[in-house]
Image (cartoon, coloured by chain):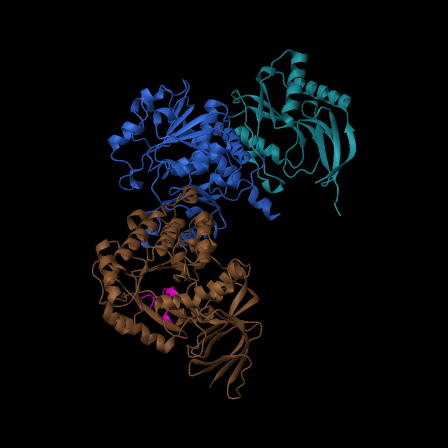
């Protein structure tokens, strides 16, 4: 199945077929990371810019490794290194980077929609590595990949997402992605962070976590993003933990072969206990591992071979 | 020299006139109004097939001068107004310095008298520096030429201050124009809170942020028997609140912007910052309720909330862009094209909301009507001419409109202020 | 793009004979069959490789390991592809170091696929030697690459295309020359 997109701005723009193509391609990429020579030449000569205007280590290094394994040249720009702190506008920053002949720009930004905005004036491929509370498409893809690896299917799975859904780009992309793939999605968390209006995404909202996780195949715990919380979204961390922390007791209500996911970094003892995070039901490290394959697939599908073809 | 306007279809909501009449103007006043006037000494303007309406009044404009002349000036803003079919505008006090003193009001009036092709009526601040703490010297400001008071953009959140301001406005026979917003509820919201804010991951401004303030100020106005005007009403519940208040004979009026009638939060899906304003574009139900309220008289006036910002300010990430869009050069064509021409509202009602009602609300005697003795401020409309909105040739200094590229039918062809033609489109 | 069939070059019988001949050549040349591994290039090269593997087993009773190679990630000619290549897994379940590799593809044309395949193999280990088997050689080489075993030389024009159809995929064994139909 060919993949015809210039940018990866969000899961919203992808069809189910597109998502499956990415997952299938990622599967083929997996072998490269485990052999001695962890490199193929397919993106040799391509220049990729990792523009991270919001701090991140794992996503940025995952993209960097993915690009390097495909032989692309990648340069990292973060907020400190760029001129953003000197008051340069995003448009100027991007246009300056493009002037150095970038083929793709991977962008992480605190403002929702920033990658969309950049794609309106930029000729490079734009890859959204997380924009504000909007989307984080590669995270959702690697989560789907991990689910497929463990469960072999999507249809009929019951996936529970717990935490600050409203401010989570991970949750938003996962909801869109898993909905397209045919899973049943249940959201749980405090009302201020899981507004009922989210039901328009064709998901179920259940504020009672014990009920929400009943018979779950997958439990996805979200990070409590302290930096994004308005006052009084919930009374205290203690209260939050009491209601929405994943414990062994709550986990008993889920299916026996349930897997626990978390986009990381984990606030251990808040979203889930340390024991659960490192238990055999946790696939948290597998998610990190799969991140590289999925990002290789995305880079290959966007940059591999289509550019020159289009000029024919 | 006298001006004779011949063969136009005169619409005058005050008298209910809708007939072909000639209008004779001398020294800025209408001196005769009847069919087939002859006057060899008058300059003749023949307008067959055109609508002649009382000059349109935009009671909600940000002219940005003094202080932010890079966005707009009194000259460019009023030129834009003339081009858009407006003969009078009322300008908001959030300039720099804030229009909270005689000096600033006089400055605006003085500049306008030299540079503005249309009438300019300054609205002064309710509180000093728009800080919401101390009310301004209202009587002095009225004496200097201010016609109303508003802390537009910075709502008066302290109920006690609002009470005092209403009381004081009452004895000075002026009006409070109320930007209704609970800033705590709006918090860091940048668009309407709902499904689309969920999709876009942008912080929402919930409808109650407007509604709780409208409710509060209705209760205060009722208690004090004061007058109040609700600026840029945007939600369904706000409309019901105003409707109920009018039923209880509370002295309340309300205005709506063209964008709140024509657009919804669905339009924000491209993160185009030209759809970012306060109050935000609401949902489909709100839009429908507003149109109904225009028809049943709950909403009294159209106003643009013309809020210029430069491309540099608007060409940024959505969260970082300032609120507001310009409207002077698009309002009339859009409303003619989308409401009048398709027959959603009558021409009479449209003209009433553009001229008679704002004149009445602001207490502008001799404006908003076409009759012998009234001011010769007229807007001539061509309902069948079409054109495409192109922000690059706006007279306004700014370009922040979501309507660029819209094809519209129905335009303000000639604008006449005090018997002088200040704008005329070549067709 | 529509194509028309210009000629049918081989049928099942001929194809079978060719594979048998090639297998004999392979056995003759590789005294040490236990050093030999076969690597088929996706997609049709894999099926031809399987047939050769079976023939060797029949003739010599030797189990030669077989791997599958997708060389897409090593190609340099994306611009010539009329649609994007979806990559498939490379499945080589054995160490290729110090082995004699028999690389198998259906048609050799410019030579670029074979170049990519060899690069790909070198990233997997250091083979002792690589031999190349192609079923059809249609000429027009752009790189100095020649096969060690060739089923048939088939001179063609650049406009023409050679279609190898195999029972495993196409329910029939045959070789066709096709040509695009000009749409006026």
In the displayed structure, A246 sits above or below B23; it is above
| Quadrant where the image shows the C terminus of chain B | bottom right
Asked whether residue A36 appears in the rendered view, the answer is no
Q: Position of residue B223 (x, y in %)?
A: 26, 56
Q: How many marks?
A: 0
Q: Residue furthest right?
A: C7
Q: Among the chains, which one is brown? A: B
Q: Is residue C158 left or right of residue A80?
A: right
Instruction: Decide whether residue B65 is among the magenta residues.
Output: yes
Q: Residue furthest front?
A: B248
Q: Position of residue C14 (x, y in %)?
A: 77, 23
Residue range of the region highlighted in magenta in the rendering: B59-74
Chain C painted colour: cyan
Viewer-side residue, B28 vs A181:
B28
Image-quadrant location for residue B67: bottom left
Magenta span: predominant SS is loop
Q: Residue at x 27, y 39 (%)?
A: A232
Viewer-side residue, B45 vs B317:
B45
In the displayed structure, C98 sits above or below B293; it is above
Viewer-side residue, A107 vs B131:
B131
Chain A painted colour: blue
Asked whether residue A188 appears in the rendered view, the answer is yes
Q: Residue furthest top?
A: C61
Q: Is residue B200 left or right of residue C113?
A: left
Q: Is residue A207 left or right of residue B401?
A: left
Q: Position of residue B280 (x, y in %)?
A: 39, 52
Image-quadrant location for residue A290: top left
Instruction: Decide whether residue B339 is among the magenta residues.
Output: no
Q: Position of residue C123 (x, y in %)?
A: 51, 29
Viewer-side residue, C155 vs A109:
A109
In the displayed structure, B167 sits above or below B10; it is above
């Amino acid at each position: 199945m060919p993949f015809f997109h210039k940018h990866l701005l969000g899961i919203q723009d992808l069809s189910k077929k597109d998502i499956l193509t990415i997952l299938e391609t990622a599967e083929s990429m997996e072998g490269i990371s485990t052999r001695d020579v962890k490199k193929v030449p397919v993106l040799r000569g391509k220049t990729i810019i990792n523009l991270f205007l919001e701090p991140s280590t794992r996503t940025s290094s995952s993209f960097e490794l993915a690009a390097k394994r495909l032989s692309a040249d990648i340069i990292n720009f973060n907020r400190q290194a760029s001129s953003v702190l000197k008051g340069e506008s995003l448009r100027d920053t991007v246009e300056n980077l493009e002037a150095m002949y970038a083929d793709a720009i991977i962008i992480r930004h605190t403002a929702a929609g920033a990658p969309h905005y950049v794609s309106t004036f930029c000729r490079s491929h734009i890859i959204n590595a997380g924009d504000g509370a909007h989307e984080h498409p590669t995270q959702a893809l690697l989560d789907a990949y991990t689910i497929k690896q463990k469960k072999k299917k999507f249809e009929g799975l019951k996936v529970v997402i717990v935490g600050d859904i409203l401010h989570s780009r991970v949750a938003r992309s996962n909801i869109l992605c898993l909905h397209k793939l045919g899973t049943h999605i249940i959201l749980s968390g405090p009302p201020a962070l899981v507004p009922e209006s989210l039901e328009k995404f064709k998901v179920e909202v259940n504020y009672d976590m014990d009920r929400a996780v009943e018979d779950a195949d997958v439990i996805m715990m979200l990070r409590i993003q302290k930096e994004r919380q308005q006052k009084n979204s919930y009374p205290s961390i203690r209260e939050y933990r009491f209601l929405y922390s994943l414990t062994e007791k709550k986990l008993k209500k889920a299916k026996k072969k349930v897997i626990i996911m978390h986009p990381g970094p984990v606030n251990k003892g808040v979203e889930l206990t340390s024991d659960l995070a490192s238990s055999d039901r946790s696939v948290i490290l597998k998610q990190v591992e799969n991140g590289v394959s999925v990002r290789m697939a995305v880079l290959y599908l966007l940059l591999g071979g289509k550019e020159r073809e289009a000029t024919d | 020299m006298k001006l004779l306007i011949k063969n136009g279809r005169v619409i005058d909501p005050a008298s209910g006139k809708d007939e072909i009449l000639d209008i004779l103007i001398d020294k800025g006043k209408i001196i005769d109004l009847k069919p087939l006037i002859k006057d060899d000494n008058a300059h003749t303007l023949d307008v067959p097939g055109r609508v002649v309406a009382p000059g349109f009044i935009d009671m909600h404009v940000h002219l940005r001068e003094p202080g932010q002349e890079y966005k707009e000036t009194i000259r460019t803003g009023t030129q834009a107004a003339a081009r858009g079919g407006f003969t009078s505008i009322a300008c908001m006090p959030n300039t720099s310095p804030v229009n909270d003193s005689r000096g600033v009001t006089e400055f605006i009036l003085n500049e306008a008298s030299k540079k503005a092709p249309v009438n300019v009526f300054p609205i002064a601040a309710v509180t000093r520096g728009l800080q919401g703490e101390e009310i301004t010297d209202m009587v002095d400001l009225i004496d200097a030429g201010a016609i109303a008071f508003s802390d537009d953009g910075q709502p008066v959140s302290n109920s006690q201050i609002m009470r005092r301001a209403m009381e004081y406005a009452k004895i000075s026979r002026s009006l409070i124009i109320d930007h209704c917003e609970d800033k705590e509820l709006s918090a860091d919201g940048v668009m309407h809170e709902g499904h689309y804010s969920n999709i876009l991951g942008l912080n929402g401004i919930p409808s109650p942020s407007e509604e709780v303030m409208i409710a509060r100020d209705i209760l205060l106005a009722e208690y004090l028997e004061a007058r109040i005007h609700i600026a840029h009403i945007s939600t369904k519940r706000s409309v019901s609140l105003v409707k109920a208040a009018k039923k209880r004979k509370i002295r309340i009026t309300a205005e709506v912007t063209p964008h709140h009638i024509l657009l919804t939060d669905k339009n924000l899906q491209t993160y185009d910052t030209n759809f970012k304003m306060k109050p935000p574009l609401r949902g489909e139900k709100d839009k429908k309720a507003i149109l109904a309220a225009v028809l049943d008289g709950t909403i009294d006036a159209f106003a643009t909330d013309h809020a210029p910002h430069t491309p540099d300010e608007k060409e940024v990430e959505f969260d970082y862009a300032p609120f507001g869009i310009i409207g002077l050069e698009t309002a009339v064509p859009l409303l003619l094209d989308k409401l009048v021409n398709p027959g959603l509202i009558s021409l009479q009602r449209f003209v009433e909301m553009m001229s008679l009602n704002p004149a009445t609300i602001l207490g502008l005697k001799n404006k908003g009507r076409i009759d012998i003795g009234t001011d010769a401020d007229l807007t001539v409309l061509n309902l069948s001419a079409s054109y495409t909105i192109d922000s690059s040739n706006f007279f306004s200094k700014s370009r922040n409109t979501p309507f660029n590229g819209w094809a519209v039918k129905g335009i303000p062809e000639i604008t006449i202020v005090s018997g002088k033609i200040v704008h005329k489109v070549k067709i | 793009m529509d194509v028309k069939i210009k000629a049918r070059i081989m049928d099942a019988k001929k194809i079978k004979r060719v594979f048998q001949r090639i297998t004999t050549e392979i056995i003759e040349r590789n005294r040490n069959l236990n050093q030999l591994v076969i690597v088929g290039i996706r997609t049709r090269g894999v099926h031809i490789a399987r047939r050769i593997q079976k023939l060797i087993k029949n003739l010599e009773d030797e189990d030669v390991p077989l791997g599958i190679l997708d060389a897409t990630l090593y190609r340099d000619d994306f611009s010539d592809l009329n649609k994007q290549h979806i990559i498939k897994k490379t499945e080589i379940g054995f160490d290729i170091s110090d082995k004699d590799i028999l690389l198998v593809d259906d048609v050799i044309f410019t030579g670029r696929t074979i170049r990519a395949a060899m690069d790909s193999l070198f990233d997997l280990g250091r083979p002792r030697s690589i031999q190349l088997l192609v079923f059809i050689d249609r000429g027009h080489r752009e790189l100095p690459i020649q096969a060690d075993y060739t089923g048939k030389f088939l001179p063609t024009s650049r406009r023409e295309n050679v279609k190898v159809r195999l029972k495993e995929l196409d329910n029939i064994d045959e070789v066709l020359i096709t040509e695009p139909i000009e749409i006026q």
